[in-house]
Image: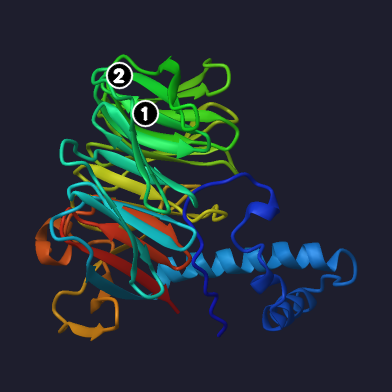
């Protein structure tokens, strides 16, 4: 068995192969992976002579994605838990092999998932509370009520605008250089230029509060509303592109966008998951996977097959992106004893995860096996979860 190891980020990107997480020298130069790829092609009767290099790179990506899906659907589950904060936090973001945690504490922490080392700490002003955050390789953008904070990776912090009330209460933020987009209680999305530090645009998205946001590389703003709709606007022109509606009136709590297939995924306050195809502006599928609120959904960049979903019932679900079928329901095996290890950076508790049979009743399962999942982020064969507690969990899936 060949194991693909990657610390690839979970955020979405454009479809060019140069931006894909597996288009890197380690993959391209791996003789073992090349031998595997050419063997698979030879066994299937395909030619290996023309366009070998480009074809191999795409082929290796395809093999890796199939293996990622297989691991999430059927692999054994190892859960690592470590104390990340002194008080409960409910948000996490994973990019570039790094994990950023916060919201609830007066500090955000940036972690290496290889060593569990806290690489950097970013402190919140005493006079403000962190609502949401996003980050890239150079900076962290945080929403502090009605203000925006920027923390550079070297530790420098700045907050703007300086005058309170410049915009109404912010509920969520997403960042794609150079713009930070704030979803506000008054139904607007306010676009801040991170270099001029000014509000460059105000876009009316909904009649009610903007509860969640997603941004695309081709300058689309996708926003969910407490009134049960998803609105899509063009960041460049401020024009609305589409409005997508759910069949129930429940609020949209979380959403994400897959640009490769132009699919929008959303989770609601009553446990429904929706998928719309932007090419047709129509619903592709909908399914109710829980009777309670869904807080977070995400997928691995370049993966067009699986979607991870978490919510208040504490079950980590893996869905088929194309059909909405629930491929697996995972939770913590609380009956087995905990093993633990300590490295120079952290004390790590280890447990096994289990998969629920289709007929299992979630409400009958002890809450210790399924603490509420307030946020999740997906990497290669792994899912990181936050639970509004001091601890962060990393779920590793392996065959």
Residue 371 vertical position relative to residue 152 in the rendered view, above or below: below
Residue 219 vertical position relative to residue 156 in the rendered view, above or below: above
The answer to whether 56 appears left or right of 337 in the picture is right
Residue 122 vertical position relative to residue 232 in the rendered view, above or below: below
Disc 2 is placed on an element classified as loop
Figure quadrant of residue 47: bottom right
Please tell me which residue lies in front, 83 or 178: 178
Residue at 53% x, 38% y: name it.
177
Q: Which mark is residue 182?
A: 1
Q: Which residue is mark 2?
A: 167
Residue at 24% x, 58% y: name it.
315
Disc 1 is placed on an element classified as strand
Sequence order check: which comes first, mark 1 or mark 2? Answer: 2
Q: Position of residue 276 (x, y in %)?
A: 48, 34
Q: Which mark is residue 326?
A: none
Q: Quadrant of the N terminus?
A: bottom right
Residue 81 vertical position relative to residue 224 in the rendered view, above or below: below
Q: Which is in the foreground here, disc 1 or disc 2?
A: 2
Q: Is residue 275 visible?
A: no
Residue at 45% x, 30% y: name it.
222
Q: Position of residue 58 (x, y in %)?
A: 71, 62
The answer to whether 58 appears left or right of 354 in the picture is right
Q: Is residue 131 visible?
A: yes
The answer to whether 117 appears left or right of 240 in the picture is left
Q: Which scheme is used to colour this image of the protein?
A: rainbow
Residue at 60% x, 30% y: name it.
279
Q: Quadrant of the C terminus?
A: bottom left
Q: Position of residue 43 (x, y in %)?
A: 76, 79
């Amino acid at each position: 068995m060949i194991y693909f190891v990657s610390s690839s980020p979970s955020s979405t990107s454009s479809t060019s192969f140069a931006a894909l997480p597996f288009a890197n020298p380690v993959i391209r130069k791996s003789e073992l992976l090349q031998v595997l790829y050419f063997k698979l092609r030879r066994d299937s009767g395909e030619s290996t002579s023309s366009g070998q290099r480009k074809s191999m790179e795409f082929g290796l990506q395809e093999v890796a994605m199939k293996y990622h899906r297989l691991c999430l659907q059927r692999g054994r589950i190892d859960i690592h838990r470590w104390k990340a904060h002194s008080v409960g936090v409910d948000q996490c973001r994973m990019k570039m092999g790094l994990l950023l945690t916060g919201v609830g504490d007066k500090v955000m922490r940036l972690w290496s998932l290889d060593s569990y080392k806290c690489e950097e700490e970013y402190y919140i002003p005493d006079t403000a509370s962190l609502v949401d955050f996003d980050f890239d390789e150079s900076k962290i953008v945080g929403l502090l009520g009605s203000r925006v904070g920027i923390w550079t990776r070297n530790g420098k912090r700045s907050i703007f605008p300086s005058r309170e009330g410049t915009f109404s209460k912010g509920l969520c933020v997403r960042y794609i250089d150079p713009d930070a987009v704030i979803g506000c209680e008054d139904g607007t999305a306010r676009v801040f230029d991170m270099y001029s530090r000014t509000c460059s645009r105000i876009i009316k998205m909904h009649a009610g509060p903007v509860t969640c946001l997603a941004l695309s590389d081709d300058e689309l703003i996708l926003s969910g509303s407490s009134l049960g709709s998803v609105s899509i606007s063009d960041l460049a022109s401020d024009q609305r592109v589409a409005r997508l509606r759910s069949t129930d009136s429940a609020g949209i709590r979380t959403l994400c966008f897959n640009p490769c297939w132009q699919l929008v995924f959303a989770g609601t306050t009553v446990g429904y998951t929706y998928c719309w195809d932007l090419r047709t502006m129509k619903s592709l599928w909908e399914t109710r996977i829980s009777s309670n609120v869904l807080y977070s959904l995400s997928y691995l960049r370049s993966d067009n097959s699986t979607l991870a979903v978490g919510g208040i019932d504490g079950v980590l679900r893996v869905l088929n992106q194309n059909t909405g079928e629930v491929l697996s329901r995972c939770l913590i095996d609380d009956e087995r004893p905990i093993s633990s290890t300590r490295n120079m950076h952290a004390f790590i508790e280890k447990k096994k995860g289990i998969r629920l049979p289709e007929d299992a009743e979630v409400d009958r399962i002890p809450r210790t096996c399924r603490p509420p999942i307030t946020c999740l982020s997906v990497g290669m064969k792994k899912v990181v979860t936050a639970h509004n507690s001091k601890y962060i969990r990393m779920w590793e899936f392996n065959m």
